[in-house]
Amino acid sequence: MISQAHRTDTHDRRRLLTRFVGCLIALVIVPLAMTDSAVQLSVGQPFTESVDLEQIRVTAVQEGGRLKTFDSLARERLKQVNRSRSARSIDPVLLYLDMMLVPEHYASANVIHIRKKPFRMKLTQAVRSESDAQQRRGVISDAELERIDETGLVSPMFLDHPVVRHVLGQLEQDIMRTGKEVDKLRTARTIADARVLRAMWRVVPPPGGGALDEWMTIEDVAGRLPDIPAHAAVQTGSATTALEPQAAMQISRAWTDLSQAWRFQDAAAASQALNTLASSFASVEPALYPEGGRLSWEHWYYRNNKLTRTWLLYFLALAPLLMAIAYGFRWARILGLTIFVIAFALHTFSLGLRWYLAGRIPNANMFEAVISSAWFGCLVALVLEYLLRRWPVKNLSALAASMYAMFAMMLGNFMPVWLDSDIGVLMPVLDRTIWLYIHTNIIIASYALIFFAAVTAVGYLLVRLVASLRAGGGGAAMYAGASDAVIGGAASIILGRKIARGGYRNAGLATSLDGATMIFLELAFLSLWVGTLLGAVWADVSWGRPWGWDPKEVFALNTWIVFLLLLHIRLKVKDKGFWTAILAIVGCAVMLFNWIAVNFVIVGLHSYA
Amino acid sequence: MTRNGIPHASGAAPASRGLVTRLLDLLGNTWFGVAMLALVLVYCWIGSAGTAPFGSWFVRQTFEKTELEWFNWWPFSLMIALMCLSLIISTLRRIPLTLPNLGVWTTHAGIIVLALGSLIYFGLKKEGDVVVYRRQAVIKAGNGEPVAMTLNHRAMAVAGDGTKSYRVRVTELNPDYELLTGADAGKRTYAAQLLVEPMGHGDVGQPFIRQLLAGYPQYTEDVIPGQGRAIKVAGKSLVDEDLDISLRYEPQDRMFLYGHPALHVRQLGSEQWAEGPLRGLPRYHERAASPADVIVSEGDGPYSLRPVDLKPQWTTNPHPLGENVDIRVTGFLPAAQLEERWEPGGDEFNPLMRFSVVLGSIAERGTLLASASHATHVPIGNQVLDVDFDWIEDPEELSRKIDPEPAALTVRVAGRRGEQRVPLADARGGPVAIRGTAYTIQVVDVYPHWTLSGRASPGDASMVLVRITGSGEPFLRAVVWPQVELSQDIDESGHRQQKLIDERIEIEATSVPRPGLTLVAGSVGLHAITTDPTGKVVSMPATLGQPVVFPADGMTVTIEAVSETARLSSKPRIIPPPQRDIRAGASSSLVQLEISEGEFSRRLWLEYSHYTYSSRAGYLPTRLRLTDGRLVELLYSRETVPLPAPVALETFTLETYPGGNRERDFISHVRFREDGGWGELREVRSNQPTAYKGWWFFQSTWDPPDPERNYAGMNYTGLGVGNRHGVLIQLLGGIMTVVGTFWAFYIKPVLLRRRLAAAAGSAPPDPARRAIDDASVPLRDESSIETPTHAVEANAGRQP
């Protein structure tokens, strides 16, 4: 009986487990499968698998003030059309070509993605109400509106519907709440137009032209490709160009061949036409064409998510570093630091590569600022790790830096659009000025240090909390006493041996965390202040006013005042560790508010930084 | 360093302490400084972000302060002053001036210096901008006075000498004109093409275009439209040598201050504006003389529309329009748009009606004028109802409305006497033969409200599409009524013909029914009349304010008001807050003026203009005729201050990234007026201002091209201008704080360590401890600061 009961029990548990796993698989796979089927190309899988896009992918395109690869262009622009999982699973170059070559397929295809669910709910709700008001209920079916609510995918045809246009016009007026989303949607609609995609595809350098001259589109050379295939043959040579007739003819013919092969899904012919186009573009004006190596590197950089997956390495460094801090394992320290150094090397390489590709220092937009800030933080952490290698605060710099860099890289990896991860050109005020190198870097380095301080401050509070729980409420006093031994950050290190007489060297974890917080804060305090002052000098040169009480300036000052308060309160209070930790966290919150809320919500002159 | 007066940490304050000492104790207390710092933090926070992220109360805006004003306000100055005082007292009383403490002293002194520098800087700060156009055309006709015309794409001027005059208009401005021939071939310059139209009686000559190149007067030449260059056509470069036009600088001698609104007035024809700064004008909240003076959108508001009473502080003459004319500001709207609409009132006979119509669940309101040439389209759901308003005095006219003639086509054929009247209803049914001819006509469709594209507003005409057979291939004729001459023929393949295909047959349509609603008022009383597409008319008598129901249409109509007179009123509609662009600044703001001339007074709204002259930023002067007949211009703009010297723009270049459509830099080359001439060429570009007599001029705005409108732009540069008193003192303060902080954090411990090492090697422990305690006070607990001796003793007591 017992055995049978046990078997039944085991059986039930297995069944439950199977169901549970089944549910999990369903939860993960089904949505993937559903969304994956959402964006349909006009060409079939056999074609997409065999067409050769590798040469055309690294073709140079002039767009947005720089020469980039076709792959970059496709990723950057199609991201504005559709960022859904399904679209990300499609090769952007393939999709771009398909949208250019078979436009009629995309008129009614659900290719545009409305990302924000509240907005799309608002849109569909308004469409329902407007349909009712215009007594046109059913013109856009309820099922269709429900599908849009669910998937967020709409077609250009839907957006062109008079009722939808009317609704968008109304939502656009609400600048505060929905105007921005309508703008995005309109941009997506514009880009989803084959004519716009072809107009952006400036792939032919002007023969005998200069580096600043505008490149030509395929239609400038080959003439207009009819949007409806039933119409007459391609008109060739309509544009007046300085192109050699032979080169123009070659491009024109290849473009026509590509169009036909694509429609007939003849992968071999399409590949040949694409490769002919790629080699023709490069040979029109070799002096203006970027070197192949740079284009390949750019493609590699974009394909590898701008190396933001380095966050995994930083993440891996956390565990051994934590063990080294908590238990003092030497092997854990070596392992943690090794992983950290490898991650930092990769991080350095990614920034160096971006610098090479952009032709300028990569700290000019949010993505670059976040990644560079993390890099500066890691650099400082490495220096501190070396200087403090014999002190109990060792490993804390690497831990805090790993955590910061991990978050920064994760933001870059998972929120590339929000951060704007594309390589762009500098706006005039940032271009060709030494201050971009000085002010910006010092400020973002200080942000990293502020974050480090918050990490160790949180650690300190956690350690205290644990101790407090263990000691039944007496921990606070115990650790207050311990932290009292530390009189300051760097001063503790410089004077430590003398003052604490061995106490600090062998200090407990809470004292080490408090000490590290102060070391970071001193550096952050100084660098934030220096950066702000140098920013004022730059503002004076650029805007004729060193200080204009711009929200960004005010919040830099606010962050600094929090640390000023911290330094003075630490002088006065008995429980220094506790108040230091609290104010370090508050300072970090103010810094993040400045970096995120002020940048994205509160308008100021610094809205790009 | 004396320590007299420092309270004993553990003891009670002696009763004999004076008020000054107590005050010094209070101000010198670290907690007092901390409290001031915390207050400064809170003040800065709410001044910049309001109560975000804990709420959405924009505190600063509640007090009608801009950022600069908020931080120049006395509460902030008081806090900073108290903080500095606290800093000074606590530093002097608590921190001994020793080498290790030099850092703290320097930092604290630096903050005081920074505060002083800021006091000077913000106290004397003036900043604004100025738009400098590239060139003006100076036009001199014969012996007449020269007339200057700023070169922008809308410029026009008239110049003459009494015998002959010319109207000169800008037709094209090319910021990057390339000289193709001559010794200067390949050079680029600014070029203007001006259309010159001679004016006067008799043969004054034909219009011509004069082309002028900046810097190359020798290449000035005329072009005769349709014929070519004058040199080739007439054998001379200039068509009319009596007309002298030259390009000169367009210098500016004043700049417009940021955030300083002002009213400008001048008599029409005068170049000079009288300026009246509007100090105390609200910035963020709606104000009006009367709530009836503004329009609030449905669902918006409510707004507390109290009046303001502000007198412009005229800078030159306290009565720029004469003592009899008093101008006061009575309202302000931060974001609004002027809307013109008809309202009952005025003296002129101009019947007006307000009505409402309900169709199904949808209600609409409207205002109609009897003088309107066409029906008003009232959108109701997905339908459009055409509503007409007729003022009728003659009962017969009303009868004709209620019982119209049946619609008909009148056909005349060349060679056939007389005409044939074919009822429209008959011709709709099938082909109708025209007697005595081979023609048949058939109505294909009727468009009661036919849009005459480019000619008139919709609803002006009706169109009947008639299929005509009998002379060769059948064709369609669009018979337009009442504009008969606009009738056109359409061939088999659907192409409209320039000429009628068959001119022998003439068709007119009369009394084509216009479906819709006609509301009638006048001595015949109030009536509501509906017409359906077939021409069926239903008429109902109406009473003011009482709904009239048309059961067949499911429509209810109410005549809400009728007035024999109407006047056009211009009222601002407040832009609801969610629809406001917060980057727009003052550009969509309006002020309301009350202009009193003795007993007579009137109110009007003025829209904001960024400058007192034309630019892409908008220029919207309002003209007003005073009771004495003078025509004056009023402008709501900004306060101006003189520049150190007039500034002129030599060239303005746009640098772009590859491709030409992303701006990389803007480069202005300017000159200042010096000693009667123009000074050296100075370059201004992003991050590279030019300094002149204590003022910095930096690149601020520009005249962007607009390829869609074929506008090349680049006609002016926008220069920011600012003074910088106290900046170096601020910088000194900043450097002192940095050096001091670095010293306190990193140099001081090294000094202490050395002192300790020295003391440990040569002296007993107590003096060593004392050395540390004396020097390290800022880093130590307050108790040890205030009782150094005790601390040392206590520490000493713990020595092993």
Image (tube, coloured by chain):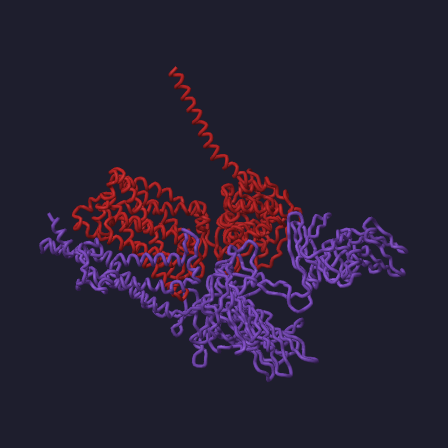
Chain colours: A red, B purple
Q: Position of residue A414 (x, y in %)?
A: 43, 45
Q: Quadrant of residue B80?
A: bottom left
How many numbered marks appear? 0
Give the quadrant of the N terminus of chain B: bottom left
Is residue B359 left or right of A368 when viewed as pictured? right
Q: Position of residue B115 (x, y in %)?
A: 32, 65
Work out whether residue B558 or residue B444 is closer to the camera in this orientation and state it: B558
Work out whether residue B178 or residue B88 is closer to the camera in this orientation and state it: B88
Residue A241, compared with residue A583, is above or below; it is below
Work out whether residue B694 or residue A245 is closer to the camera in this orientation and state it: B694
Is residue B561 left or right of B797 when viewed as pictured? right
Q: Residue furthest top?
A: A1
Residue at the spot 20% in from the left edge and 47% down from the top edge = A504
Q: Report if residue A84 is visible in the image.
A: yes
Q: Report if residue A62 is visible in the image.
A: no
Q: Position of residue B424 (x, y in %)?
A: 81, 53
Q: Position of residue B434 (x, y in %)?
A: 87, 54
Q: Quadrant of residue A363?
A: bottom left
Is residue A533 left or right of B391 when viewed as pictured? left
